[in-house]
Amino acid sequence: MIVCHCNVITDHEVREAARKLKEQKGGGVPTPGAVFSHLGKRPKCGGCFPTIIELVYAEHESDSADTANS
Ligand code: FES
C-alpha cells in the first residue's frame, strides 16, 4: 500500500527503513525525517507523516515483542 503519494513510498518500504534505522541507532525509534532520508526522498506535503509515525511505532513494537519473547 502506498503511504506517501508525493514520493510513492509503500508501507513495506517504511517498515524496512524503520527496522534498518533501529539497528543503526541502537534501538531508537526513527523520526519520519530519518525514514525519508534513509529512502533518499524528501517530504513534500507532510500529509503522510501520521501514517509513517504509526508504521514506525508498529514496527518498533513488533520488534520489541519479538525480542521479549526470544
Ligand atoms: S504524502 Fe508524503 S510528503 Fe506528501
Image (tube, rainbow, N blue to C red):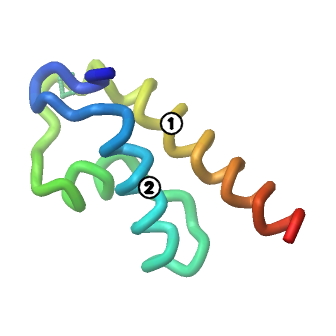
Give how far apart the Cα atoms at labels 2 and 1 are: 8 Å
Report whether 19 appears left or right of 11.
Answer: right
Determine the image quadrant of residue 29.
bottom right
Q: Quadrant of residue 11?
A: top left
* Quadrant where the C terminus is found in the figure: bottom right
Identify the residue shown where x is 41% and y is 67%: 21
Please say if 50 is above or below 43: above
Residue 16: image quadrant is bottom left
Question: Residue 1: image x %, image y %?
Answer: 33, 21
Instruction: Name the residue at 50% across, 36% down.
Output: 55
Mark 2 or mark 1, earlier in chain: 2
What residue is disc 1 on? 55
Q: Is residue 2 left or right of residue 45?
A: right
* 10 Å crowding of disc 1: few (<14), some (14-19), many (20+): some
Residue 47: give x, y in percent of width and height: 28, 19
**Residues at discs 2 and 1 in contact (Cβ within 8 Å):** yes
Left or right of 44, for residue 27: right
Q: Which residue is mark 2?
A: 18
Q: Which mark is residue 23?
A: none
| Residue plotted at (11% across, 44% down) | 42
